[in-house]
Image (cartoon, grey):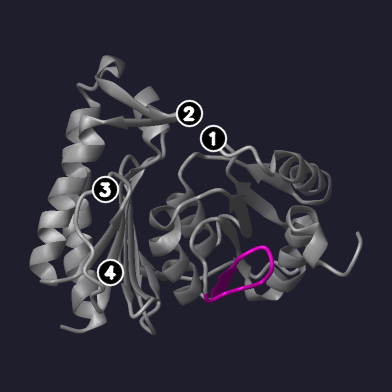
C-alpha cells in the first residue's frame, strides 16, 4: 500500500471518527470531563475516539507504532508510526466552540509521510501525502504568496500549561500585533497549520505543543508549498515543542523574528 492509498483510507477513518464526535457534541455536558493536569482536560469522547482510531489504523498497517494523546496503542520500534490526536481542541469542544478536529499523522522512519486533519464543525477535510500535494475536500491547496511581514495574518496558540517561556512569548506576540496585519488564536493547532496550508493564515507560531498536535498539519503545510521548523530553524526535528510555519517567501524572516524573541541566546541579530 503506497502513501496515497494509505491517505485515502485515513481520510475515511477520520471522517467516521468525526461523525461520532459530532453526534456526541449534541448531547455532551461538562460534568463528563476529567482533569488530567493544569488546564488539561479529557472526556469520554477523546478516549473512545482514540480507541476507534487505534483499532482502525492498526488494521490498516498491522504492527505499526502509535504516539497518542491519551496513551492508547503500543510502541515496538516499528517502521511506521501513527501520531494521532482524536480531538484537537478539547476545550473548544467542551464549550461548544468551533474549531475542533481529528488529527492523524503517519511517519515512516521518523519522516512525516501522510497527514489528515478533519475540522469537524466546518466539515473540512485537509489531507496530503509525501510528494502528493495538499488537499481540502478534493481540491488542491497552497500556501499564500504574501512576502512582507506587515501583510501577514498570523496564527498562534496561547500557552495553557507551560509558562516557562511566557515572558518571551508575550514579547513576540507584542511584536506581531504591532507589525503584522493581525493575530488570531483559534484553539486547535492542527487546524491552524491547515489554514496556513490553504492560505487563510500566512504564518503560525507556538511553543509547548506535542507531536500529535502538529504531525499531520506539518506534512500538509509542506505539501502545500510551505515550511515548518523549530524557532532555531531545525526542519527535521519538529515535534511540537517549538513550531513555526509559513510560506516559502516569508518563512526565513518570520522564523528569525520568532527565534529572536523565543530563543534570543541562539540568534545573532537584534530587531
Q: Position of residue 90 (x, y in %)?
A: 37, 35
Residue denoted by label 2 = 38
Label 4 crowd bin: few (<14), some (14–19), many (20+), radius 10 Å: many
Q: What is the secondary structure assignment of the residue under circle 4?
A: strand
Q: Position of residue 96 (x, y in %)?
A: 36, 26
The answer to which image quadrant residue 184 occupies is top right
- Residue corresponding to mark 4: 81
Local crowd size for mark 3, using a 10 Å CA cut-off: few (<14), some (14–19), many (≥20):
few
Residue density around tag 2, few if under 14, some if 14–19, many if 20 or more, within 10 Å: few
- In the rendered image of this protein, does residue 154 appear above or below residue 93? below
Place of residue 254 in the rendered image (x, y in percent of width and height, measured from the top left): 73, 64
SS assignment at label 1: loop
4 and 1 marks in contact (CB < 8 Å): no
Q: Which residues are magenta?
A: 226-236
Cα–Cα gap, marks 2 and 1: 6 Å
Disc 4/disc 1 C-alpha distance (Å): 27 Å
Q: CA distance from mark 3 to mark 1?
A: 19 Å
Residue 161's tag is 1
Q: In the rendered structure, which disc, 4 or 1, sits on the residue that comes first in sequence?
A: 4
Return the residue at label 3: 71
Q: Earlier in the sequence, mark 4 or mark 3?
A: 3
- Report x, y in % for residue 46: 25, 38
Which sits earlier in the primary sequence, circle 3 or circle 1? 3
Secondary element at image label 2 = loop
Amino acid at each position: 500500500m503506497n502513501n496515497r492509498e494509505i491517505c485515502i483510507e485515513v481520510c475515511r477513518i477520520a471522517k467516521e471518527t468525526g461523525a461520532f464526535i459530532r453526534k456526541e457534541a449534541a448531547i455532551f455536558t461538562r460534568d463528563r470531563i476529567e482533569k488530567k493536569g493544569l488546564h488539561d482536560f479529557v472526556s469520554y469522547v477523546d478516549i473512545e475516539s482514540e480507541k476507534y482510531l487505534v483499532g482502525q489504523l492498526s488494521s490498516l498497517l498491522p504492527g505499526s507504532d502509535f504516539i497518542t494523546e491519551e496513551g492508547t496503542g503500543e510502541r515496538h520500534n516499528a517502521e511506521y508510526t501513527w501520531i494521532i490526536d482524536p480531538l484537537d481542541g478539547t476545550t473548544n469542544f467542551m464549550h461548544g466552540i468551533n474549531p475542533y478536529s481529528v488529527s492523524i499523522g503517519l511517519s515512516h522512519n521518523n519522516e512525516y509521510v501522510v497527514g489528515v486533519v478533519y475540522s469537524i464543525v466546518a466539515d473540512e477535510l485537509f489531507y496530503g501525502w509525501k510528494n502528493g500535494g495538499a488537499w481540502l475536500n478534493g481540491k488542491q491547496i497552497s500556501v499564500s504568496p504574501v512576502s512582507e511581514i506587515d501583510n501577514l495574518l498570523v496564527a498562534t496558540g496561547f500557552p495553557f500549561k507551560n509558562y516557562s517561556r511566557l515572558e518571551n512569548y508575550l514579547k513576540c506576540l507584542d511584536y506581531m500585533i504591532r507589525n503584522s496585519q493581525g493575530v488570531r488564536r483559534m484553539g486547535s493547532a492542527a487546524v491552524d497549520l491547515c489554514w496556513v496550508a490553504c492560505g487563510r493564515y500566512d504564518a503560525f507560531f507556538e511553543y509547548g505543543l506535542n507531536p500529535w498536535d502538529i504531525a499531520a498539519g506539518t506534512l500538509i503545510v509542506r505539501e502545500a508549498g510551505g515550511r515548518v521548523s523549530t524557532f532555531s530553524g531545525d526542519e527535521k526535528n519538529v515535534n511540537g515543542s517549538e513550531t513555526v510555519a509559513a510560506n516559502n517567501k516569508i518563512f526565513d524572516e518570520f522564523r528569525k523574528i520568532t527565534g529572536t524573541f523565543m530563543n534570543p541566546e541562539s540568534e545573532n541579530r537584534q530587531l
